[in-house]
Structures are given as C-alpha cells and as structure tokens.
Amino acid sequence: MADNILVMKDITKLFPGVKALDNVNIEVARGEIHALVGENGAGKSTLMNVLSGVHPYGSYSGDIIYEGEVCQFRTLRDSEKKGIVIIHQELALIPELSIGENMFLGNERRGRFSLDWDRTYHDAEQHMRQVGLKDEPATLIKDIGTGKQQLVEIAKALSKNVKLLILDEPTSSLNEEDSQMLLNLLLEFKKQGMTSIMISHKLNEIAFVADRITVIRDGTTVETIDNANRDIDEDRIIRGMVGRELSDRYPRRDPKISDEVGLEVRNWNVYHPIYSDKKVVNDVSFKVHKGEIVGFSGLQGAGRTELAMSIFGNSYGTNISGEILVDGKPVKFNSERDAIEAGIAYVTEDRKGNGLILKDTVADNTVMARLGKVSKRGIINKHKENAFAEEFREKLDIRTPSVQQVVNNLSGGNQQKVLLAKWMFASPDVMILDEPTRGIDVGAKHEIHSIMNDLVEQGKSVIMISSEMSELLGMCDRIYVMNEGNIVAEMDAKDATQEKIMTAILKSSH
Amino acid sequence: MKPSVNEAGAQLSARNFSGFIKKYTMVIALVVVFILFTWLTNGRLMYAQNMSNLLLQNAYVLVMACGMLLCILTGGNIDLSVGATVCLVSAIAAQMMDKLKVGAIPAILICMGIAVLLGVWNGFWIGYVHIPPFICTLAGMFLFRGLGRVILDSKTVPISNKTFLNIFASYINIPGLDTGDSKRVMSALIAGIAVAVILILNTIISRRNKVRKGYKIPTALSAYSKTLIIAALVVFYSWKLSDYKGIPYMMVWVLAVVLLYSFITSRTAFGRYFYAVGGNEKATKLSGIDTKKVYFVAYTSMSILAGLSGLLMAARVGSVNGDSGMSYEMDAIGACFIGGASAYGGSGTVPGVVIGAILLGVINQGMSIYGLDNNWQYVVKGAVLLVAVVFDVVSNRKTGKG
C-alpha cells in the first residue's frame, strides 16, 4: 500500500438544508502535490475546512486519518499543531502590520517580559528566504504586492512547521509571472519532501504541478486521475466536473425577444477601488434586448459582480470608463439613485450584507428603494406601504406571518424573495440579478425562476449572473462567459453546453 | 405530541406576557423607580413644585436626546460636542443681550443661526469627509467650549432681558382665567383635560377608520387601556402643574421638539433613512439613498437642538459661565440608551428616549430630594446606564439581531 500521509474516509457534512459533502473519499500520498478540482460550490473548500478543523470534529461524519492515526480536530490550532496549514483564497494578512508581525500573529516570539522583536524579525527573515522573499521583515504588508503577500502566507505556514500545506486557489489573484514563481516554489518544496493539496480552477497550472487530481462534484468524489506523466486529458476533467444530467428543472417560456435593446454597455473598464492599478473589468461590451434573459457565466472573481455594480451607479470600483445606453439613449449615472431613476435595478448576491436591512420589517424593506411611491411630500403613508408589501407578498408567495415581520426571522429563500420584491417594487425595466438563487432550496429556486420568466414576459430585460451553469443554460436566451475581467465568449443558449462554457473559461485562463 | 388547546393557549399568553414585559421594560422600570423614590422621600417627590421642576430641570435632556437619537440611529454614533455647543450658544446669547444690548428676538435668531453653522461644521466633516463622529465631535467639544469661554471672557454673564426670560422660562398665564382668587392655575388644568379628551377621541376615531377600511386593529382592551392610562397621567400632571404656577413655556418648547422628532422618525421618508443607514449602510446606499446626507442631517439637527437647549438653559439658570452645559452630552446619550436605542444603531424611538430621559430625571431628582451624596448619584446613574445597555445587547442576542 502506498504511503499515505492523509486519508479522508466517507466524509459527510450537512449544512442546514444542504448536504455539502456526501461520502467523500480522498487519499493523499506523502510528498505529492494533489490537486482538487470542481465547480463553485462542489464542496472543495468545505472539505478542506473539515480537514483543518474549521468545521470541528463532530459536525461531520467519517474519519480523518493523518500520519496513520485518526484525528479529531476541534479548532484550526489542533490541525496546525500536527503540521496541517491551510492558506485561504482570501489572504488573511493584516495590512497595517509588518511581514514579521503577520508571520507570528497568534504565535508570537516572546521574550521574558515582552515580545522579542529581534527574534521575531530574525526568524521571519529565515522563512522569507526559504520562499525567495528579499524584503525587510519590518515592511508593512500593505506596501508589498499581492504576489509577495501570497509568499508571506506560505512563509507563515513554514514557520508553523508545515507538513501538509493546503492552498485554496493560490494563484487566483496573482499575475502570470507571480503564479509561475509560486508553482515553482511548490515543486521546490515537493523535492524537500513536503506534501501539498492545491485547489484550483486553472487546468494548465494543475497539469504543470499536480501528481494526482481528484475531481469533486456536488459534494462527492468523482474520480482521482493520475498525472505522474503530466499527460492529463483536460476534457476528461471538465466532463467530470460538470457531468450532471440536465433535467427539466426550469420553468418553460416561449421567448418573445424584441429587437429593441433595453441596456447596452460599450467598452466598459473598471479598476479596483483600493489597488487602483488593478483592472477588474477590461473593455467589456454587451447588450440585453427587451424580453430577453441574458446570463453571465464565470468563476468567482471573474469580474461579473464588479461589472454589474459599476454599471449600477458606480457602486463599485474607481476610474470607470465606458458608455451605457438605456433604450438606445446614452446615459450617465453618478449615483445609485440615477441608475434607479433610469429604470435599472441591481439585486445583489449578498442579500445580508448589501441587500436587506435584517432588523427591519418585510414592509420596510419592500418599499425602501422607492419610498417616494408610498409617500407624499416626504411623509410616508403607512397604509399604502402595507398594501404594496401585502401585494408583493402574495405575488411572490413570501411566506411570513405578516409584512410587519422582521426580515431576519425569515428563511433564506423568503429573504431572497423580499429582496426581489424590493427591486420589483422599484419597477425597473432592466433587472440585474446577481446569484439570485444561491443558498436557497429547490422549491424557492423554481419560484424565483418563474418570477424571472414573468418579468421578461412583460417586456423587461433581465441579466442573470450565476455560478451554476445548469441554471444559466436552463433559463437564459444568451450567455456571456467572463474570465479575469474579460468577456471571453458569447453563445446562444441553444448551442451552449456546460463543456463549452468550461472550456472557454479554462482555455482563457493563464 | 400535539399540545392541547389549553397548553397552546397558555404558551401563547406566556409569550404575550413576556412580550409585554419586554416591550414596556423601561416604562415598568420608570414606575418602579418613581414609586421607590416617592416612598424614600416620604412623598416629597410628588409635591407640585417638585413635579414641575422635574420637567424644567430635564428639559435640556429631553430636547437634546431627540437629536442624539438620530445620531445614534445611524450606527451607534454619538455627538460629544453638544454640551460645548450649549455653552457657546448661550454665551453668545448672554453677551449679545448683556453687552451689546441686542433685543431678545434678534439674539435668539442669531444664536440659532450659529447653532446651524456648528451643526453644518460637524455634519460636513462626518458626512462628507468621513471623519469618525467620535473624533470629530470630540474636537468640536474642545473647540466650542474654548470659544465659549473666550466669548465669556472667563466671567459669569447674567441674563436679564425680560423678553428672553419670558419666551423660555416663564409660565403661561391667561388674564381673567388664572388671576382669580383661587390659588390654582386653571389654564393648566383645562389644557390637560383638553389633551386627554383629544387623545381618547383620537383613539376612537382611528379605530373606527381602521375598521371601515378593513385593517387589522389591536384589541379594544389594549388600545383603550393604553390611551386611558396616558390620559389619566396627563390630567394628573396638569393637576400638579396647576398647583404650582401653571404650564411652563419650557414645556411647550420641549413638547414641540418631541412631537416634531417623533413625527420625523416614525412617519417621514427621511426619518426612515436614519434607521436604514444604521441597519445596513451598504444596502441603504445600493437602494439609491444618499447616506452622506443622512449623516450630515443627523449632526446638523443635533447642533440645532443643542443650541435651543443652550437658550433654555440660559433662561432657566439666569446666567452663563464657562462650565455651562458641562457633561450635558452624557445625559443626552444616557437617555437614548436607557430609552432602548440600540448601541449598534438602527433601532430606537422618540417615545422610548423620552421615557429614558424621564427615568434619568426621576432618578436625579429623587436622589437630590432624598439627599444622597452628589458623588454617589454618579455611581447610581452609571449603574443604571450599564444595566440598560447590557439588557439591550443581551436581549437582542437572544432574538438573533445582535
């Protein structure tokens, strides 16, 4: 039997209402680089969180056998003590602190009475040399680029005597050069005997570094493919990732697409609001006809949300340039209010963070984007407000004892419907729905899809951003594929397949 | 196992009861504290003069707490500069009338204009430059207090302008009605009874309207008992006032502010924005609401009310010095939190804040009449404030809103 550093056996993890992992099995041999691939939401990150103790022992079923013994990690610290270190996609460094301070955060180098700064910086420098970082350890994190920050994370892992390094999308925020450097570093560590698990969407990178590849889909392991000879078949991986049956899960609609264009965007460019030299959306042009549902596909971080929000009254990004045409007339939005007045609505993907006021009532939230409709000279007509809220409650079948119920007490699916009600109340002509069905149950999903069909039936334009490809294929008339801030493909839904979309994304990744 | 009808009923009434307790915690606390101090002071708290003073001494808290509520609603933000604003505005008023012999009306208008400017100053930095409110108003606190002392030239300046005193600190006295032989001031009693009748009529009419339009109405018992209790209190208080000089003009000012702010926060679109910003600023912005303006208005209105408080304070005390308005901000902030405003913003009501201010006032007054050492009064006030906020945080956590 092979020398496995880690075996995860029959791991099952339930979240309320969702089976995130369903009897997952994975074996990682000592000294290999093992890649984990799968669609968004397939369960890769959940699996790694189970392994590292973020989801503590007892919250899942199945066994983790590490270094030959069954482990019961209750916290991140337990797993780190054993040499398992996870580096998340979102870097967990504190910008205002120095490299050295970040490296030993929570694991400080102490002297007799206080922190031992000399030892902190001396030790930090040692680890930094190992990853090829030549900066001063007293440099602040905010003063180095994202590529170097990723290296700091790895150096930090080394400082914890890492034996099994887990990297979640390590290159997603890096440019090509930095990515290559990072991959070389991984190969170098492998020579020194370290084991790594790498989660990635980038098949070319996986083909380059991984010894074996495990494909996960819908919370189960599909297969593990050997890549010892660096000769993997990309199509096989893609099929493995997306290969579910596309059943008749979507409500029918006879498309009545008008020739008139509801919204057109030309040469749209957006830069990151903080790192203002980083381009998030690159020269994007697209249009939506009246009565049409247009989908935007892509991986997380492809720039879809950023595109939508920047169009919606510059609510994201800096240095935005490009043209917007509503009903064929060029317009300029200086604020969200301008966009709403022009008939555009943006239904956020983050209903708790950006969408709803959880401690307010269903009625308050419903009328929020257009209070003017229920008030006269600034004074709210409560009866009108309730009547509208009641109307939408019936129309969207929002299950709540009353429209005076606090939104926080509703289920996720019903909260999502309140969010939709809020923007339908604003009566837009173009509705941008960002992940409208994420994290809600199948029934509510179907209802939201029906609502979308009703909207286009009335001649409105709908843009749907979704990470679920089957949903896009089932609902849309046309699909744009985005990757790394660019539109990399446009296809008619009739001709589109999951394989085609995935191929477009992966072929354009570098 | 299915609960029997009886059990279910019992559960329901238990929930109603705990809901009732939760909704009216501070009212209940107020009643308990009031009875406690009435007992401790052998009923002296209930003397007409003390009842009248209860209002006069806390007028500035009531007025400023309304403005402070708006600031707190935007996210637990407070305004530390209001005590200093009171000092600066009243100093200007005193010096204008005392040294420059400016008339009362122009002096009041100029002072209110200055209060607006101070508010715009705070509001601009906080709303449009995103200076943290705590820091900005801390700076304001030093700035305005310092300017106030400069203007006063480190002296105590008396207020002797008759018109000014009449507008803020005299009592309503209707010739022919209140100057009779009877010691009782009839106008106060008549006004009290009139308000009580209006309250009851209003309840009846609005219930009838709701029935006519087919809206849900609260049970007759709860609606009428609430109204009747309030009406009885109004009549009782006006009876007390009529026993001692009648209705103070200061009460008219306080009522005007309380009613206006109550209306703004509960009935207007802009009032709704304060709650929205405190509940979820990002969502509010994405709903097309100008969040900068919300902050701006909150802090501008706060200073305007602080200016008004300054005038009320100056007229009541009769003089202004460099320590006037000292730590008033703490009373206003305390009243808001005791009155149930969330320390994280997004919830709180004007009636709640009024209850909080009165509770604080009763404790102050009760302790003074009882003769508790001034230093211990601080200890008690601090404890009450902490208990109120802990209660808010813990009870919100239980319902998952924290």
Image: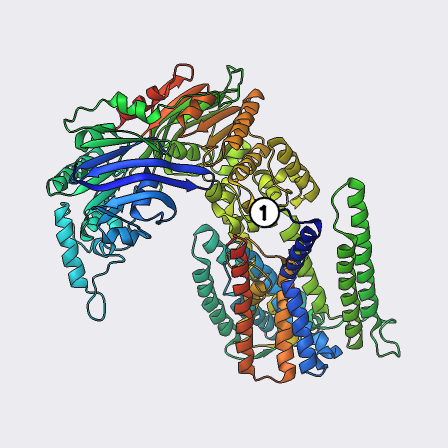
Residue plotted at (75% across, 72% down):
B171
Residue plotted at (69% across, 60% down):
B256
Q: Position of residue B241 (x, y in %)?
A: 77, 73
Three-letter code for the amino acid on which mark 1 is drawn? Val
Which quadrant holds the N terminus of chain A? top left
Q: Is residue B75 left or right of residue B310?
A: left
| Count of picture labels | 1
Q: Is residue A95 above or below residue B151?
A: above
Q: Nearer the viewer, residue A337 or B139?
A: A337
> Which residue is the site of mark 1?
A406
Q: Quadrant of residue A172?
A: top left
Q: Nearer the viewer, residue B139 or A76?
A: A76
Secondary structure at badge 1 equals loop
Q: Position of residue A67 (x, y in %)?
A: 20, 46
Q: Nearer the viewer, residue B108 or B364?
A: B364
Chain designation of label 1: A
Residue plotted at (42% across, 24% down):
A470
